[in-house]
Amino acid sequence: MTRISLYQGMGHKKRSLLWRLEGEILDVPSFVFGTMHVRDQLAFGALDTLYRCIDTCEALATEFRLEDMGDPGGMMQVMQQSSQSLDQYYRPKVYQKMRRILRKTLGLELDQLKHLPPFFVLNMINEQLMAKDMPLSLDEQLSAYAAAQDKTLLGVETFAEQIAILEKIPVEEQLKSLRAMLAQFARHRRQLKSIGDLYATGDAIKIYKATRKGAGGLRKLLLFDRNKIMADRIYDICQSQATFVAIGAGHLAGAKGVLRYLKQKGLRLIPISIGP
């Protein structure tokens, strides 16, 4: 028997990034929105709609409470998990080549980052590569708006849990990913831009496919396992109060996506069109 996904045979509207949650267990509707940690203005086109949804809720839940990251220095100290620095992992010629690439292209000094886990360095590079049109990333903007409206700020996961996930990724895999990204830097920059453009279309299924492909062999750890946990927690959070949930867009769709798990729990999922 052919498996039918949540999106198969549905129109573009039902591939939306914004969904209203209804059900007998919910006194009032809640919302799930697929966000992205970017400052590119292309991701901010639906702010008015998102604000109106937040206004109807008592709380906003991001993947984790953004304020729990603390100040940048504290976050870097928490993220420091490697027993060795990058220049000890890579051969000297390889490390110096990576160092020159980062200095020339982004003005980053790898020596100042070498004590951080490779994946954290990779994420920092990705943030530097993305457009910086807005003062805050989209998820930070939504959280700031909710705080200004005196909404309760929650986390679907905790920051400590996200750090624990990072610790489960073998350092060899992290080193391989960082080196591969810098070895094909121009290609990586183009791929990153295409993801931003894809997000602007508001098509959750295409974003999920791109996220799944990008996760490679880590998709179970980074996506599938977390999706089930997040769906369970979203289900519980929304029973206690109307909540606007903003999680990474790549977690929404797919046979093991958050939306499918919420539907299996008996909730009605109603798409809200916010795309072009």
Image: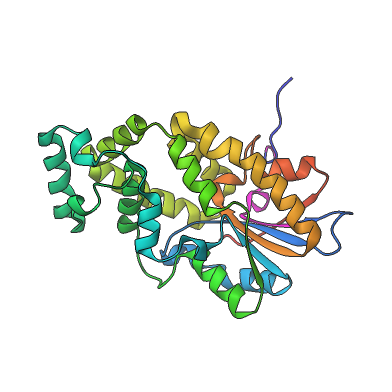
Q: Which residues are magenta?
A: 8-20
Q: Who's the residue at 41% across and 64% down the image?
A: 40
Say which quadrant the N terminus sits in.
top right
Decide if residue 50 is in sight here. Answer: yes
Q: Who's the residue at 14% across and 54% down the image?
A: 104
16 falls in the magenta region: yes
Q: Position of residue 68 (x, y in %)?
A: 51, 62
Q: Position of residue 138 (x, y in %)?
A: 49, 65
Q: Spot the residue most to the top.
A: 1
Among the 4 quarters of the image, the one containing residue 63: bottom right
Q: Who's the residue at 41% across and 71% down the image?
A: 134
Q: Is residue 271 left or right of residue 122?
A: right
Question: Nearest the camera: 201 or 24?
Answer: 24
Question: Nearest the camera: 101 or 273?
Answer: 101
Q: Is residue 139 left or right of residue 179?
A: right
142 falls in the magenta region: no
Among the 4 quarters of the image, the one containing residue 50: bottom right
Q: Is residue 212 left or right of residue 154?
A: left
Question: Nearest the camera: 219 or 233?
Answer: 233
Relative to 256, residue 243 above or below: below
Q: Position of residue 269 (x, y in %)?
A: 76, 51
